[in-house]
Image (tube, grey):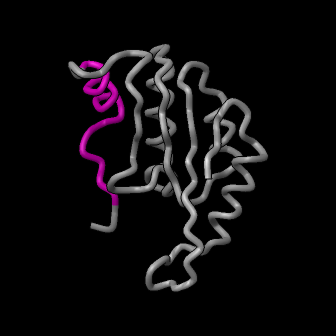
Amino acid sequence: MKQPHQLMSDEEVVNMLVQHRYFIPHKTPLQIFNKATDPFLGAVRPHTHCMLSLLDNRGLMNHILVITRYVVTEEDMRKLNQLQHLRVTLLITFNGLKDSRIEPLSKKITLKSIEVACRQKGRTKVIL
């Protein structure tokens, strides 16, 4: 499958997470949308921000890692920096491969994302 498919609502996912027996509020490190998709793909981006807001609105201070290799916009950074409780780290991956058969994403996209994220980082940690 090349297209992401939503299996349940963002609210249901957050409820399942915080009710899980191994979830410890303010302690359990979190990571979202990394295995099957990128958190900043067009169809996924609204869910990324929604889930982060839902978690933050609960007053959770867990560390959350958001890993991307796609487009990070100034609006994304503004939303990440508005989160008051979650401790967000944005990890931008970059491999520099030139063969488009192996790495179809232009390095210009990643380099622009790094530039935007570093310039607008605020309280969001940025790692390359």
Count the marks.
0
Q: Is residue 10 above or below residue 70?
A: above
Q: Is residue 109 above or below residue 118?
A: below
- Which residue is at a point 67% across and 71% down the rendered structure image? 108
Tell me: 92 left or right of 112: left
| Magenta stretch, residue numbers | 4-19
| Residue 101 spot, x, y in % from top left | 45, 85
| Residue 97 spot, x, y in % from top left | 55, 78
Q: Is residue 5 above or below residue 99?
A: above
The single residue placed furthest to the right in the displayed view is 119
Tell me: 110 left or right of 10: right
Q: For the stretch drawn in magenta, what is the main secondary structure?
A: helix
Quarter of the image for the N terminus: give it.
bottom left
Q: Is residue 31 above or below residue 71?
A: above
Depth check: give the residue in front, 116 or 47: 116
Quarter of the rendering containing residue 115:
bottom right
Tell me: 50 left or right of 35: right
- Which residue is at a point 29% across and 23% down the rendered structure image? 15
| Residue 39 spot, x, y in % from top left | 47, 50
Residue 11 among magenta residues: yes
- Which residue is at a point 66% across and 51% down the rendered structure image? 73
The single residue placed furthest to the left in the displayed view is 21
